[in-house]
Image (cartoon, helix red, strand yellow):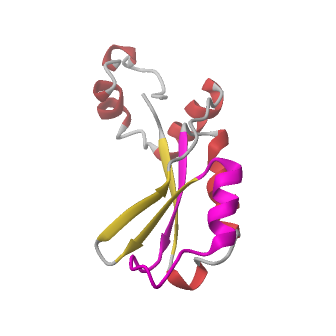
Amino acid sequence: MSVSTYELKPYAQARNLAGVYEASAHQRRAHLSSLVIEWPLDEEHEPPSAVVAECQRLGVGLVRMWETNAERLIEPTPQRPLAAELNDFLSDIITVEQTPRYLDAIGRHDELTDGEDEKV
C-alpha cells in the first residue's frame, strides 16, 4: 500500500511557498506528497520558479491544473513514514464507518472483531 497526499492551492496562492512547506509536512505521514497549483498550462505561463525549486529541493511533487486538465511537473520523492505515523494518519482520515471497507480493500478484513473499538 502506498499513501499519496495532495496540497491544493488556488491561483491566488500558487506563488506562495507556504503550499510547498505544507505538502512537505505531509511526508511525515505519507509515502508520496505533492503540491497541486492552479496554473495555466500554456507556455506563456511558466510555474513560479521559486515554487518549482523548493519542490525539487524538498522532494515534493508538483502538479499544475487549469480547468479540468492537469500536468505533473515533478514526481514526488518516495518517503518511508513510520508505521505509527501512517496508522495515525489513516485513523484521522478514515471514519469508523469506513474502516471495514478500508480493511476489506487491503485484504485485512479479518482484523475487525466484534465488540472491540474499530481501529485502522
Nearer the observer, 72 or 9: 72
Q: Residue at x 51, y 82 (%)?
A: 11
Q: Residue at x 60, y 80 (%)?
A: 13
**Count of all numbered marks drawn on residues in the image:** 0
Q: Residue at x 65, y 53 (%)?
A: 56
Classify the position of the N terminus by image quarter.
top left
Residue 15, given in percent of the width and then of the height, sits at 63, 78
Q: Is residue 118 left or right of residue 97?
A: right
Nearer the observer, 92 or 30: 30
Q: Is residue 113 left or right of residue 16?
A: left
Q: Is residue 52 left or right of residue 6?
A: right
Residue 109, given in percent of the width and then of the height, sits at 32, 20
Residue 42 on the magenta span: yes
Outermost residue on the front side: it is 43
Q: Is residue 35 above or below residue 45?
A: above
Q: Is residue 56 left or right of residue 75?
A: right
Task: Name the image quarter holding residue 100.
Answer: top left
Nearer the observer, 77 or 80: 77
Outermost residue on the top side: it is 110
Residue 18, given in percent of the width and then of the height, sits at 70, 68
Task: Name the image quarter holding residue 28.
Answer: top right
Residues in magenta, as a range:
32-60
Q: Is residue 38 above or below residue 5?
A: below
Q: Residue at x 54, y 46 (%)?
A: 76
